[in-house]
Image (cartoon, rainbow, N blue to C red):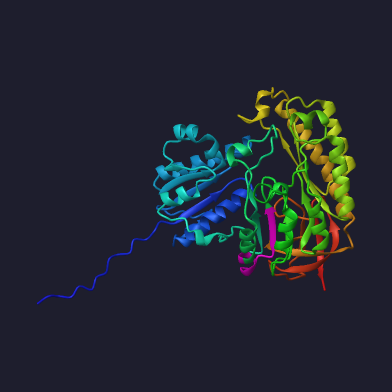
Amino acid sequence: MKTKRTDQPQKISKPRVNVVTLGCSKNIYDSEVLMGQLKGNAFDVVHEAEKLNRDDIIVINTCGFIDNAKQESIDTILQYSTLKEQGKVGKVIVTGCLSERYKPELEAEITNVDSWFGTNDLQNLLHTVGANYKHELIGERLLTTPSHFAYFKIAEGCNRPCSFCAIPLMRGKHVSKPMDELVTEAKKLAANGTKELILIAQDLTYYGLDIYGKRNLDELLRNLSDVNGIEWIRLQYAYPSGFPMEILDAMNERENICKYLDMPLQHISDNMLKSMRRGITKQKTIDLVNQIRDKVPGIAMRTTLITGYPGETERDFEEMAQWVEETRFDRLGCFTYSHEEKTHAYSLEDDVPEEVKQERADAIMEIQQGISFEKNQEKIGKTFKVLIDKKDGEYFVGRTEFDSPEVDNEVLIDANLHYATPGSFVNVKIASAEDFDLYGQIVK
């Protein structure tokens, strides 16, 4: 008599994929797209999980921008490759800017990494872990940020010739994303509770030139502004040369386009701007900042500067310091120059000592600290619309429309006196202020 078999073939479970992200918001976006694809392929995917499984596939999304970022990426690769040797994780895969730029050297030095991929190798990376790239998932992402805000990449790469920058080496030429795809992505995010889009690219202002034959950021802004549920749209990484003033019209027309502009200017000395190949002069920079402020009263302007670029004299630096004092940016960051291989500036002598670079950066930030304190004091007694990001200890932490996550001011609300839901908007009256923090109470 035959016995009926009841056993079924065992379903082979897929290993968990743990994605580790280093570097800028563009890398965060890329990791989120990767994670969305993996989830669509029925993988268990996590972001920077503290507890590791011995079968985990670790995917490290690296940064290769400047020396400190490169070192952090290398240290992270070595950390996980050691854990692999110890049997504490399964595979280690490296992707992103560092491996795009230095893959042959890294492969030779760190031999127990399973695979190396560049910045445009998503399909190959997916194939390596046993997943397929799914075109129907365009616009789908697994957010690593709180769900109420999302970085929103509108283009990849850069056509600018800045002498100090290695981004074109790692990211290639500028490629705009089609507008209909971006609107679809925004609608999907809004449907899942996203209220703030933070527009990012190597250069937002170049958007559309390659596919529409004209700068088209203003039209994109209006289309995104029409998406139901999107309450804030924020612009990061605008380029000063050839700045399309039409985007300021859109900012004035639409309440949900934040009066905020992040425009890295890098320096103000004509000698430095010319050597940096920025395509703009000191006077044109000053005129542009004034025009933007005139056209959008109350706009918050953020910039980024570099100290210690090759040939920067004390006079060049003093010129920049005086300009920072006079211009009174709302937000400002400062980097020391990093001498990057294969950039145009690499042929120049890196002649400013590291300690001088750092002293100059610290001096700029000290000036900005005073400006920020004075500007924050002016906010006391005023009421602002605030987006609550999180609860941290005794405070609910939020931001005004003039502040981007991670890099700008925060609004702190005493959680013992008030309650707010992360992801909600509240009106906050500012009671006191420090250099980079505002304290206030929720009002009706």
Q: Is 237 on the left-hand or right-hand side of 74? A: right
Front-lying residue, 17 or 152: 152
Q: Residue furthest front?
A: 213
Q: Is 137 on the left-hand or right-hand side of 396? A: left
Q: Residue furthest bottom?
A: 1
Residue 414: % across, % down: 76, 65
Residue 101: % across, % down: 55, 36
- Assign the N terminus to one quadrant of the image: bottom left
Give the residue displayed 15% in from the left and 75% down from the top: 3
Q: Is 369 on the left-hand or right-hand side of 171? A: right
Front-lying residue, 255 or 303: 255
Q: Residue furthest left?
A: 1
Residue 309: % across, % down: 73, 29
Magenta stretch contains residue 150: no
Quadrant for residue 82, please give it: top left
344 over 112 or under it: above or below: above
Q: Is residue 433 visible?
A: yes
Give the residue displayed 78% in from the left and 27% down from the top: 312
Give the residue displayed 46% in from the left and 45% down from the top: 93
Magenta stretch contains residue 192: yes
329 over 141 or under it: above or below: above
Quadrant for residue 275, please give it: top right
108 over 142 or under it: above or below: above
> Which segment is the magenta one?
188-199
Front-lying residue, 381 or 143: 143
Count the labels in the image. 0
Residue 126: % across, % down: 45, 52
Q: Is residue 49 visible?
A: no
- Assign the C terminus to one quadrant of the image: bottom right
